[in-house]
Amino acid sequence: MVKKESIEHKDFKEMMQIKNTLQDKLKNYETKIDLLNKEKLSVWKEMSVVNQYFKKHCNHNWGREAYHYSPLRCSICEIERA
Ligand SMILES: [Zn+2]
């Protein structure tokens, strides 16, 4: 962990190495985040297919929560009405 106090006596070259290491770490996180977002999107697509089923087959009980502009939501299958 780089802290303000720990860099006081480092030279320029060391600082460039630290900077490069941190940039690599950030790139690594970006790659992981991209992958997680792709996986998440894939699950949302599956969820959409499942919700299509409920849209058709549930005996919906539509209601709204007690806040302004809350969407119509079925209390049984929990899908929202567009
Ligand atoms: Zn329903």
Image: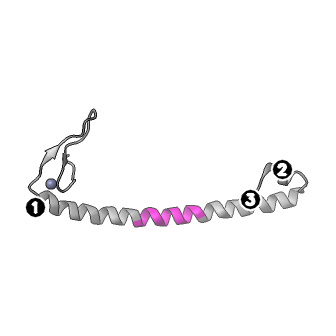
Q: Which residues are magenta?
A: 29-39
Q: Amino acid at mark 2?
A: Glu
Specify which label sits upstream in the sequence, 3 or 1: 3
Q: Give the distance between the C-alpha atoms of the residues marked 2 and 1, in whole angstroms.
A: 63 Å
Instruction: Give the image quadrant in which the ligand numbered 1 is located.
Output: bottom left
Residue farthest to the top, as pictured: 68
x and y percent of residue 6 in the render?
84, 54
Q: Is residue 37 magenta?
A: yes
Q: Does 75 sit left or right of 44 as displayed?
A: left
| Rendered-image quadrant of the N terminus | bottom right
| Residue 30: x %, y % from top left | 56, 61
Q: Residues within 10 Å of mark 2 (few under 14, many from 20)?
A: few
Q: Which residue is mark 1?
A: 57
Q: Secondary structure at mark 2?
A: helix
Quadrant of res 22: bottom right
Mark 1 residue type: His
Determine whether the residue tagged by mark 1 lies in a helix, strand or loop.
helix
**Labels 2 and 1 touching (C-beta < 8 A):** no
Disc 3 is placed on an element classified as loop
Q: How crowded is the residue under tag 3: few (<14 C-alpha within 10 Å), some, or many (20+)? A: few
The location of residue 26, given as percent across then percent down, is 63, 60
Report whether the residue tagged 2 is closer than 8 Å to ligand 1: no
> How many residues crowd mark 1 within 10 Å: few (<14), some (14–19), many (20+)?
few
Q: Which mark is residue 1?
A: 3
Q: Amino acid at mark 3?
A: Met
* Image-based side of 13 in relation to 23, left or right: right
Q: Which residue is tagged 2?
A: 5
Q: CA distance from mark 3 to mark 1?
A: 54 Å
Instruction: Examine the image and state in which quarter residue 38 appears.
Output: bottom left
Q: Residue at x 46, y 65 (%)?
A: 36
| Between 58 and 24, the one nearer to me in the picture | 58
| Principal secondary structure, stretch drawn in magenta | helix
